[in-house]
Image (spheres, rainbow, N blue to C red):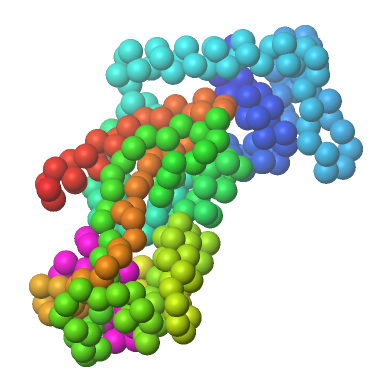
């Protein structure tokens, strides 16, 4: 029985669309349709109800009955591959979404290891904020996310990766006092922070809303590199991961600000959907965990 046809059946059933399955499997919609038709002919049953218009493709009663068996076949095939230690046989494309903090730290090491272990695999990389990456994982447009997690969804696997502490920093040109500061003392300048629809921004903005006196003004950005540049240019006071400011602190172009409150550390996970079973994402996630652990040990 053709493995690719079985895999196609599972993806169409999961996504409810020949078009989406074609995008996921990097082929054309006619090719997906041909595989399903060939599988139906081989099994002698109709697997999908093909509705006219934009309605999702629905499984027939027989299709629903056979789906768990097909998923089991694919799972057992993957276990056979693992037993044979044949990760080098993996091919195709994996779509990886990455938070910028990781992109600036151990992403290159991870991608090198991924290529060494699965040299036939192509990678499509997206650097985005966690809310965008989380949505991509849920709708299956992203196979693996390295993001601020976990994602609270029963179909999503979350593996702990690493944590990054945050600090308040500013250019010495702002002449902030060298003592413990109240948050109110930071509000004369813009607060440079993460994007508005991110966890850090929500925490920081809530904390400043609780203060008495004039409201704080925020310069929010999806780019940590942009936030760093704004801080270096004395535009405002920024909260940044320590790993992204160490060189500037040593050079004296940024100064760590001691404040009475500092945002919570950033916790990252390797997150992917296992419905349907995605062996490449599973293996890649474990490589990410190993890479993150090694990075943490080296920088302890």
Q: Horizontally, is 154 left or right of 171 in the view? A: right
Task: Answer yes or no: is residue 230 visible.
Answer: no
Position of residue 222 relative to residue 65, above or below, is below
The verdict on residue 231 being magenta is: yes
Task: Answer yes or no: is residue 263 visible.
Answer: yes
In the rendered image, residue 248, in percent from the top left (x then y), is placed at: 17, 74
In the rendered image, residue 14, in percent from the top left (x then y), is placed at: 65, 30
Total marks in image:
0
In the rendered image, residue 231, in percent from the top left (x then y), is placed at: 30, 80
Q: Horizontally, is 251 left or right of 138 in the view? A: left
- Residue found at the far front of this picture: 212
Position of residue 13 relative to residue 262, above or below, is above
- Residue found at the far right of this picture: 52
Position of residue 200 relative to residue 287, above or below, is below
Q: Residue at x 38, y 17 (%)?
A: 81
Between residue 176 and residue 223, name the one nearer to us.
Answer: 176
Residue 49, quarter of the rendered image: top right
Q: Residue at x 15, y 70 (%)?
A: 247
Q: Quadrant of the N terminus?
A: top right
The verdict on residue 5 being magenta is: no
Q: Residue at x 29, y 37 (%)?
A: 289
Position of residue 230 relative to residue 73, above or below, is below
Which portion, as a residue range, is magenta? Answer: 229-248
Q: Residue at x 15, y 80 (%)?
A: 178
Between residue 2 and residue 213, name the one nearer to us.
Answer: 213
In the rendered image, residue 182, in percent from the top left (x then y), is placed at: 29, 75
């Amino acid at each position: 029985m053709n493995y690719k046809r079985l895999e196609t059946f599972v993806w169409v059933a999961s996504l409810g669309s020949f078009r989406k399955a074609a995008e996921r499997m990097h082929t054309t919609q006619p090719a997906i349709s041909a595989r399903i038709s060939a599988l139906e002919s081989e099994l002698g049953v109709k697997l999908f109800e093909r509705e006219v218009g934009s309605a999702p493709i629905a499984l027939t009663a027989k299709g629903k009955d056979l789906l768990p068996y097909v998923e089991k076949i694919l799972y057992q095939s993957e276990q056979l591959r693992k037993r044979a230690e044949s990760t080098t046989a993996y091919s195709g494309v994996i779509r990886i979404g990455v938070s910028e903090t990781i992109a600036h730290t151990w992403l290159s090491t991870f991608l090198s290891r991924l290529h060494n272990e699965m040299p036939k695999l192509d990678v499509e990389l997206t650097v985005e904020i966690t809310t965008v990456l989380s949505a991509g994982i849920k709708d299956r447009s992203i196979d693996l996310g390295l993001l601020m997690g976990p994602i609270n969804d029963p179909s999503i696997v979350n593996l702990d990766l690493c944590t990054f502490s945050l600090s308040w920093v500013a250019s010495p040109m702002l002449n902030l006092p060298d003592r413990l500061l109240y948050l109110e003392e930071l509000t004369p300048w813009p607060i440079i922070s993460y994007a508005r629809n991110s966890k850090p921004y929500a925490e920081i903005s809530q904390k400043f809303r609780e203060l008495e006196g004039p409201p704080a003004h925020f310069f929010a950005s999806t780019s940590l590199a942009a936030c760093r540049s704004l801080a270096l240019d004395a535009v405002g006071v920024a909260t940044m991961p320590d790993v992204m400011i160490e060189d500037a602190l040593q050079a004296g172009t940024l100064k760590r600000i001691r404040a009475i409150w500092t945002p919570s550390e950033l916790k990252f996970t390797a997150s992917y959907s296992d419905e349907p079973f995605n062996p490449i994402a599973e293996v890649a996630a474990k490589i990410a965990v190993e890479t993150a652990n090694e990075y943490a040990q080296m920088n302890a």
